[in-house]
Image (cartoon, rainbow, N blue to C red):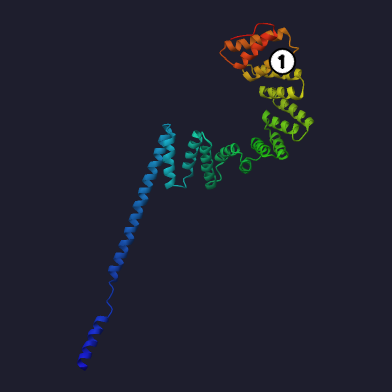
Amino acid sequence: MAEAVKTKHRSSSRYSKPSRVNVRLLMFLLGGCVVTAGATHGLHAFQLDRNSNALSLRAEELTRDGKDQEAIRDYQQYLSLRPRDTDSRIRMGQLLDQNAETPRQRLLVYKVFERVLRDDPTRDGIRSRQVEIKMSFRRFDEAVEDLKLLLKSSPGDGELEFKIGQCEEYGGRPQEAIVWYRRAVDHEHHSPEVFLQMVRLLHRPLQQPREAEQLIETMIKVNSQSAVAFRARTRYRRTFGSLEQALADAREAARLAPDDAEALQLMATLIVSDPNSSSADLNKLQNTLQSRLVNGNDDTPIHRLLSELHLRLGKTRWHP
């Protein structure tokens, strides 16, 4: 009995003894797994690079061939693989911008360019275009923020200051708008448009007609050879001045730009509507308008003016 117990104890001790681990085999297997995983990752990265590069190259080729919609699709796929490629995102955004026809499409352009500026705030060219897009969407406060950032890169830029003034005006803040318009003029942004924006504000919401008159004169002084400026003062004087003054400006605009159809029509309208216009003036205008038609300018306003001229001269209504 005791011998049986001893035998059972030896047997139990033999089977319960822990087996020895083959460390070399385990390390070999682990190393193999690491190598396999690394190779798999490397292969995936290689395939990703190859696929994304192919998409990028094809998108560029499609753009050169004028196949914008196909190029946009390839850029979208490429950017899903390489979302940090800002240059490619800009190219896609510019294609979208060139082809945008609906508000929804323009909104997509807005979103793409916002992502570009978030990733790289130094892209001033994209920011300038984004300002125009935001203004078209009446996002004036956002546009002002972008314009002020652009001003940090280009301090004293009168055109940027003018646009800030426009945003303030369209956003319902005329006093702030005037401040920015004045800065634009001080920095030699002398476009007739900036003066007209100020004159409109000074006449209506701000009720400062004397200052408006001074601005109109300044506009002519700094744009003495601009038909656009004289056309602008013509319209101003039709409302706030005399017909004689307006006609003098209209004649000067037509003299400065003989081929400017708008200047000619403005002058003709004033001559026809002026009861003091002489027969000589009316006949001279008639010859001028008819010569425009002979030269291939089939303008409906000119036809209308010629009809009115014939009536003024006591002739039968003119027909082309």
Q: Looking at the image, is 102 positioned above or below residue 4?
A: above
Percent coordinates x, y for residue 4 in the rendering? 20, 90
Percent coordinates x, y for residue 135 in the rendering? 60, 38
Q: Is residue 260 visible?
A: no
Relative depth, front residue between 57 and 303 = 303
Left/right of residue 261 with respect to residue 1 in the rendered view:
right
Q: Quadrant of the C terminus?
A: top right
Relative depth, front residue between 119 and 15 = 15
Q: Residue at x 37, y 45 (%)?
A: 51
Q: Residue at x 57, y 39 (%)?
A: 130
Q: Residue at x 34, y 58 (%)?
A: 37
The residue furthest bottom is: 2
Q: Is residue 227 visible?
A: yes
The residue singled out by tag 1 in the image is 273
* SS for callout 1: helix
Q: Quadrant of the N terminus?
A: bottom left
